[in-house]
Image: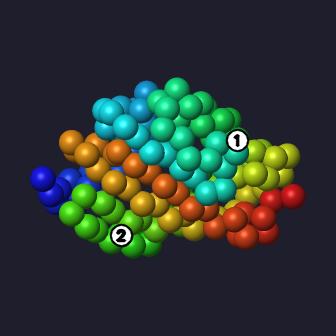
């Protein structure tokens, strides 16, 4: 069954709010039951589907990055998916989640997400980080 843009926006906005407030249980509650796909490019985890591994990725992310602001640039929609482009601003404490271990700094970079939904929740999340921008403000 197709979802409306408003339903997709609500789910993703809640998911992003959980991420912004380091609410691990909230993030996990935004994910669908059954098979999952979670992938951040680049990431030391690669593509993962196990809930415990997804939880571990977020624990690492929360320890290594602090966002100050996220601005939605645009969203594109399909029947059961959304493409979201966001400008993230904040501090990288340790670039480990992005294969930049030991690097830190403040800056901003774009993040491109693809979300696929099932039963009103996120079944697949892929995020591409603008790595060149991150490399430019971390040392």
Read off the residue under disc 1: 64
Circle 1 SS class: helix
88 sits left or right of 133 in the view: left
Picture layout, residue 43 above or below residue 27 = below
Write down the quadrant of residue 105 in the picture. Answer: bottom right
Q: Is residue 27 visible?
A: yes
Q: Residues within 10 Å of mark 2 (few under 14, many from 20)?
A: some
x, y percent for residue 81: 30, 60
Q: Element type at marker 2? A: strand
Numbered tag placed on residue 136 in the rendering: none
Q: Nearer the viewer, residue 85 or 91?
A: 85
In the figure, 132 relative to 12: above or below? below
Disc on res. 75: 2
| 33 and 61: which is toward the camera | 33
Is residue 135 left or right of 13 when viewed as pictured? right
In the rendered image, is residue 16 in sight? no
Count neighbours of disc 1 (C-alpha within 10 A) and say few if under 14, some if 14 to 19, many if 20 or more: some
Q: Residue at x 75, y 51 (%)?
A: 99
Q: Nearer the viewer, residue 7 or 53?
A: 53
Instruction: Give yes or no for contact between labels 1 and 2 (Cβ–Cβ under 8 Å).
Output: no
Residue 17 located left or right of residue 20 = left
Counting from the top left corner in percent of width and height, residue 77 is at 28, 68
The CA span between labels 1 and 2 is 27 Å
Question: In the figure, is residue 75 to the left or right of 127?
Answer: left
What quarter of the picture does the C terminus occupy?
Answer: bottom right
* Picture residue at 69% right of the left edge, 65% below the top: 131
Q: Position of residue 97 (x, y in %)?
A: 69, 46
Precedes in sequence: disc 1 or disc 2: 1
Q: Position of residue 19 (x, y in %)?
A: 49, 42
Q: Nearer the viewer, residue 95 or 81?
A: 81
Kindly identify the residue that appears in the image at 17 percent across and 56 percent down.
3
The residue lying furthest to the left in this view is: 1
């Amino acid at each position: 069954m197709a979802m409306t843009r408003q339903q997709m926006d609500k789910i993703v906005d809640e998911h992003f709010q959980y991420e912004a407030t380091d609410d691990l249980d909230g993030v996990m509650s935004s994910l669908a039951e059954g098979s999952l796909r979670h992938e951040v490019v680049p990431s030391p985890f690669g593509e993962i589907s196990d809930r415990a591994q997804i939880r571990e990725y977020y624990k690492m992310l929360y320890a290594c990055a602090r966002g100050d602001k996220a601005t939605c640039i645009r969203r594109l929609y399909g029947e059961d998916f959304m493409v979201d482009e966001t400008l993230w601003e904040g501090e990288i404490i340790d670039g480990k989640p992005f294969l930049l271990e030991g690097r830190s700094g403040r800056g901003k970079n774009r993040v491109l997400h693809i979300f696929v939904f099932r039963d009103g929740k996120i079944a697949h999340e892929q995020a591409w980080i603008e790595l060149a921008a991150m490399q430019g403000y971390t040392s």
